[in-house]
Image (cartoon, rainbow, N blue to C red):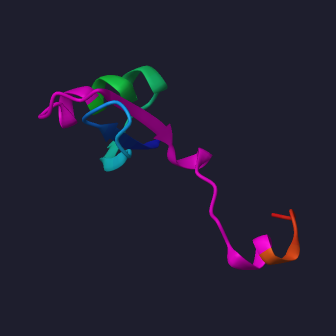
C-alpha cells in the first residue's frame, strides 16, 4: 500500500506533504515514515493511506454531493 506522509515543525503550523512510503500495514508505514523523514524535530508526523484520499472535483461540488 502507498501512504502519504504529512508533517509540521511547530504546533499550529500548516501541515506539509513530506513524501510517500510503501508498506504492508499501518504500523510499518509509521515506522518507515519515521525512519525516512526524521531529519527535522517534527511536532507532528502522520501517514494517510493513498486509498483514503478523496479527489475534489469541481463538477461534483457544483452538482451536489454525488461522488
For the point 28% across and 29% down, the residue is: 32
Residue 46 on the magenta span: yes
- Check the image and name the residue furthest to the front: 12
| Left or right of 39 on screen, residue 33 | right
The image quarter in which residue 64 lies: bottom right
Residue 15 to residue 42: above or below: below
For the point 38% across and 46% down, the residue is: 14
The image quarter in which residue 58 lies: bottom right
| Left or right of 19 on screen, residue 27 | right
Residue 54 to residue 47: above or below: below
Residue 63 to residue 33: above or below: below
| Left or right of 41 on screen, residue 15 | right
For the point 16% across and 27% down, the residue is: 41
Q: Position of residue 24 (x, y in %)?
A: 44, 30
Quadrant for the C terminus in the image: bottom right
Give the magenta part as a residue range: 34-61
The residue lying toward the viewer, choosing from 63 and 50, is: 63
Residue 51 on the magenta span: yes
The residue lying toward the viewer, choosing from 9 and 27, is: 9
For the point 37% across and 41% down, the residue is: 6
Amino acid at each position: 500500500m502507498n501512504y502519504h506522509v504529512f508533517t509540521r515543525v511547530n504546533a499550529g503550523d500548516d501541515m506539509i506533504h513530506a513524501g510517500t512510503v510503501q508498506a504492508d500495514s499501518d504500523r510499518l508505514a509509521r515506522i518507515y515514515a519515521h525512519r525516512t523523514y526524521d531529519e527535522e524535530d517534527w511536532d507532528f508526523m502522520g501517514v494517510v493511506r493513498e486509498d483514503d484520499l478523496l479527489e475534489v472535483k469541481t463538477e461534483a461540488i457544483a452538482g451536489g454531493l454525488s461522488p
